[in-house]
Image (cartoon, grey):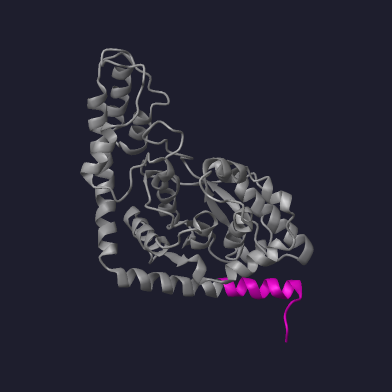
């Protein structure tokens, strides 16, 4: 990802509720990731690369969404905790700093579940069924049982994850705005019923929505096996790049090729800082004056140069498992203090406080 890429606030949304409380402190960003496997370049471009610069602008809370992982992977939970630690090591590798952001585990802050339950009392089921990714995920993950209440309620738990920290902003790609709009609707409905209690979050639009897979699929996904993992060695990265999908009509190097929609060039634009080289490759490719091997070799070099420091920091974090554990426990403790304040306010507004 190009340096200096930052998320952009959506400024045409309606004002936040509970604004006086939210504006009295540093603005807060909340986001999380499901620990369902090793992180790949899609996560780096779509999330981590945008999370990093936010640390210098906002009070950031980043969490391991282990309960969310159960919505699709409940049949085998054995790798969940190890994935959680590996994913957090990837966060550190990508440049996230636990001294500047709060890292925590969703299930270590049970207030998330309480707010989710209370919100579920006031949200109509059709609101959840109309979320675009509800049917999309059912089509994509046909090998998994997604008929559970947990999967249907996934967007509502996301709402609780954000609202419980009075988040001002949530970093999202363009295809995720509908999710956040549901959260905003839920917050508005709750506040209409019980008063000015929760903050209505705004989206921070990220610079890249999705990175295409190595096979040319529109999305890089572990389920499709078309990924480059942040933990892949330099040799593994090079081998994967050399097998990448390009222009299928170009059977020889002297045949003019198509750059648009070609994943090799999409990756060059995202990861190769030598823009002059990228533009030269494009011109030569379009006129049949460069072969795929030369273009891919340069891409592999650029990718490994980008990933080398990430791999180094990742390995250093994993070499200290005790510190990783303590960092998540302490971060969860701090997060829970904030969540407890919100839940006290929610219970009071709903008049379910027993004194």
Numbered marks: total: 0
222 to 161, vertically: above or below? above
The reply to whether residue 187 is visible in this rendering is: yes
Residue with the most extreme right position: 193
The answer to whether residue 151 is left or right of residue 265 is right
207 to 80, vertically: above or below? above
Residue with the most extreme bottom position: 355
The answer to whether residue 187 is left or right of residue 313 is right
339 to 228, vertically: above or below? below
- Please name whichever residue, 200 or 91, is drawn nearer the observer in this view of the structure: 91
- Please name whichever residue, 267 or 205, is drawn nearer the observer in this view of the structure: 267
Position of residue 208 measured from the top left corner of the image (x, y, whole percent): 46, 40
Determine the image quadrant of residue 303: top left
Q: Is residue 111 magenta?
A: no
Q: Give the quadrant of the C terminus.
A: bottom right
Determine the image quadrant of residue 199: bottom right
346 to 253, vertically: above or below? below
Residue drawn at x 60%, y 58% is 150
Q: Give the quadrant of the N terminus.
A: top left
Position of residue 117 measured from the top left corner of the image (x, y, whole percent): 66, 66
Q: Name the main secondary structure of what is drawn in magenta.
A: helix
The answer to whether residue 123 is left or right of residue 169 is right
Determine the image quadrant of residue 99: bottom left
Residue drawn at x 61%, y 74% is 341
- Please name whichever residue, 240 or 355, is drawn nearer the observer in this view of the structure: 240
Question: What segment is highlighted magenta in the picture?
Answer: 339-355
Residue drawn at x 56%, y 54% is 169
- Please name whichever residue, 2 or 173, is drawn nearer the observer in this view of the structure: 173
Position of residue 113 measured from the top left corner of the image (x, y, whole percent): 60, 67
The reply to whether residue 201 is visible in this rendering is: no
Position of residue 104 measured from the top left corner of the image (x, y, whole percent): 46, 67
């Amino acid at each position: 990802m190009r340096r200096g890429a930052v998320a952009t606030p959506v400024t045409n949304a309606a004002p936040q509720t509970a604004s006086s409380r939210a504006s009295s402190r540093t603005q807060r960003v909340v986001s999380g990731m499901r620990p369902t496997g090793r992180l790949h370049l899609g996560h780096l471009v779509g999330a981590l690369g945008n999370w990093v610069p936010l640390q210098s602008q906002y009070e950031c809370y980043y969490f391991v969404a282990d309960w969310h992982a159960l919505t699709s992977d409940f049949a085998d939970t054995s790798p969940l905790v190890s994935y959680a630690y590996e994913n957090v090591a990837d966060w550190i590798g990508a440049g996230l700093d636990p001294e500047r952001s709060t890292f925590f585990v969703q299930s270590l802050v049970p207030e998330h579940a309480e707010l989710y339950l209370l919100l579920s009392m006031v949200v109509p089921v059709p609101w959840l069924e109309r979320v675009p990714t509800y049917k999309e995920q059912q089509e994509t993950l046909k090998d998994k049982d997604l008929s559970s209440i947990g999967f249907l309620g996934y967007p509502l738990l996301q709402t609780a994850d954000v609202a419980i920290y009075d988040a001002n902003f949530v970093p999202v790609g363009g295809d995720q705005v509908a999710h956040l709009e549901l959260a905003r609707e839920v917050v508005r409905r709750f506040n209409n019923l019980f008063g000015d209690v929760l903050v209505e979050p705004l989206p921070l639009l990220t610079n890249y929505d999705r990175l295409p897979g190595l096979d040319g699929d529109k999305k890089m996904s572990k389920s499709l096996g078309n990924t480059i993992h942040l933990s892949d060695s330099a040799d593994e990265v090079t081998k994967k790049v050399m097998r990448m999908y390009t222009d299928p009509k170009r059977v020889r190097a002297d045949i003019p090729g198509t750059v648009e929609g070609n994943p090799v060039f999409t990756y060059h634009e995202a990861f190769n800082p030598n823009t002059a080289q990228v533009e030269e490759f494009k011109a030569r490719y379009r006129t049949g004056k460069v072969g795929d091997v030369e273009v891919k070799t340069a891409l592999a070099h650029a990718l490994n140069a980008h990933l080398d420091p990430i791999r180094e920091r990742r390995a250093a974090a994993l070499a200290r498992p005790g510190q990783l554990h303590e960092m998540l426990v302490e971060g969860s403790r701090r997060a829970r203090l904030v969540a407890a304040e919100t839940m006290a306010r929610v219970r009071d507004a709903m008049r379910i406080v027993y004194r």
